[in-house]
Image: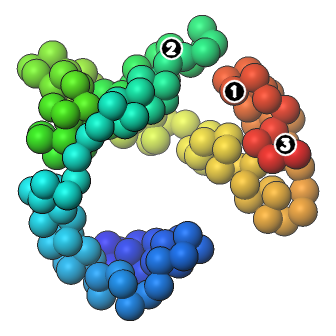
Amino acid sequence: EKDQFYEETKLFAMLFGVPEPALPADWNAFMEYNRAMWASPQLTVEENGIRLKEDLFDPRSVWMIFPLWVQEQVTAANLPPRIRDEFEMKYGWWQKFNNALIMSGATVAQWMLPKSLERNPLYHEANARLEGKRVGAYNQFLIEALLDKERLVN
């Protein structure tokens, strides 16, 4: 599954102009590359990065406070410790506890929710656009409520 996932993401990289020969050959090589980069002084966080992080996690709607808090917790849990520290993101026992609750809650929700709610409304909109259609009313409502936009791309 990891190799298949990695092969599928190579297309995404190529869409951004990264030639296939520049990409690691498989999942294991990709992870080796990542571990080397995480330890490298080449990967750093500067002031612009910190401002971008603050902007990304700044809820512009009361509806976004909880989802962005969750996203920040999950992001902090998955960043390499040095990079997390450079982004000034806390990850002590309280954040670890919250992340464990979030992950277990996501697992339970995945079992309980109908398949139509399993994916983000933006995922549904992207698929509808690929088919030349508009997203359904429920997902349209969520996009408008959460992002204050009619749709992502007009």
Query: Quick one: label 1 or label 3, which is nearer the N terminus?
Result: 3
Residue 17 placement, left or right of 103: right
Instruction: Give residue 80's position: percent from left, percent from top.
Output: 16, 46
Residue 91 placement, left or right of 153: left
Mark 2 in CB contact with mark 1 (< 8 angstroms): no
Residue 3 placement, left or right of 44: right
- Sort mark 1 into few (<14), some (14-19) or many (20+) by Cα contacts within 10 Å: some
Instruction: Give residue 74's position: percent from left, percent from top.
Output: 32, 34
Q: Cα distance, mark 1 to mark 3?
A: 16 Å
Q: Residue furthest front?
A: 47
- Residue 65's label in the rendered image is 2
Quadrant of residue 35 in the image? bottom left
Q: Which residue lies furthest to the bottom in this view?
A: 21
Query: Quick one: label 2 or label 1, which is nearer the N terminus?
Result: 2
Nearer the observer, disc 1 or disc 3?
A: 1
Residue with the mark numbered 1: 147
**Disc 1 residue type?**
Leu
The residue sitting at 19% across, 22% down in the picture is 90
**Disc 2 residue type?**
Ile
Instruction: Give residue 55's position: percent from left, percent from top.
Output: 49, 25
